[in-house]
């Protein structure tokens, strides 16, 4: 995540199923995205673009997002192709890779 910011990029904002699958075909691993509800609990924003999640593409795993303000699961990670759907995670809980993208 810090690599992206240190190099003038941001974590990926997934805009379609096809984009998500293209990333997973190159890097099939659990990784961070730029989606979070850090600023307002329950209101998910693509931090890379400042765009609200809805209306738009979403691919939550069943029962997700399931975090409460007490659990602070404010960041979304997307799984490998062997898993199904996005999960909400504690932002600083896991050391995960992330795909960077450049936003001019």
Image: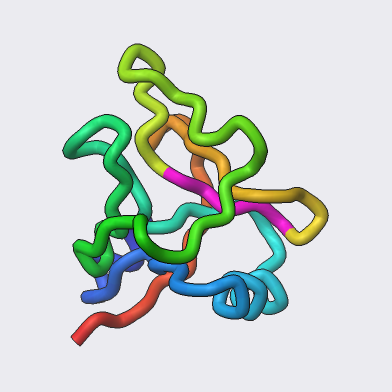
Q: Foreground residue, 32 or 57?
A: 57
Residue at figure coordinates x 50%, y 42% from the top left:
95
Image vertical order of residue 25 relative to residue 93, above or below: below
Q: Which quarter of the rendered picture does the N terminus lie within?
A: bottom left
Residue at figure coordinates x 49%, y 34% from the top left:
65
Residue at figure coordinates x 52%, y 48% from the top left:
77
Residue 9's x, y, as percent? 28, 74
Residue at figure coordinates x 41%, y 65% from the top left:
56
Left of 87 or right of it: where is 92?
left
Residue 76's x, y, as percent? 46, 45
**Is residue 101 magenta-colored?**
no
Left of 31 or right of it: where is 28?
right
Magenta region, residue range: 76-80
Left of 73 or right of it: where is 17?
right
Q: Residue furthest front?
A: 55
Instruction: Identify the main secondary structure in magenta.
Output: strand
**Way the structure is coloured:** rainbow
Residue 8's x, y, as percent? 22, 75
Q: Foreground residue, 68 or 98?
A: 68
Q: Residue furthest top?
A: 70
Image vertical order of residue 64 relative to residue 18, above or below: above
Q: Residue furthest right?
A: 82
């Amino acid at each position: 995540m810090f690599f992206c910011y240190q190099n003038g990029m941001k974590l990926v904002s997934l805009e379609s199923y096809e984009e998500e699958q293209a990333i997973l075909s190159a890097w099939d691993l659990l990784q961070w995205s730029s989606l979070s509800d850090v600023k307002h609990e329950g209101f998910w924003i693509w931090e890379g673009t400042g765009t609200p999640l809805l209306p738009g593409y979403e691919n939550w795993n069943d029962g997700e997002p399931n975090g409460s303000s007490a659990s602070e699961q404010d960041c979304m990670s997307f799984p490998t192709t062997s898993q199904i759907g996005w999960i909400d995670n504690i932002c600083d809980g896991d050391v995960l890779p992330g795909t960077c993208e450049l936003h001019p």
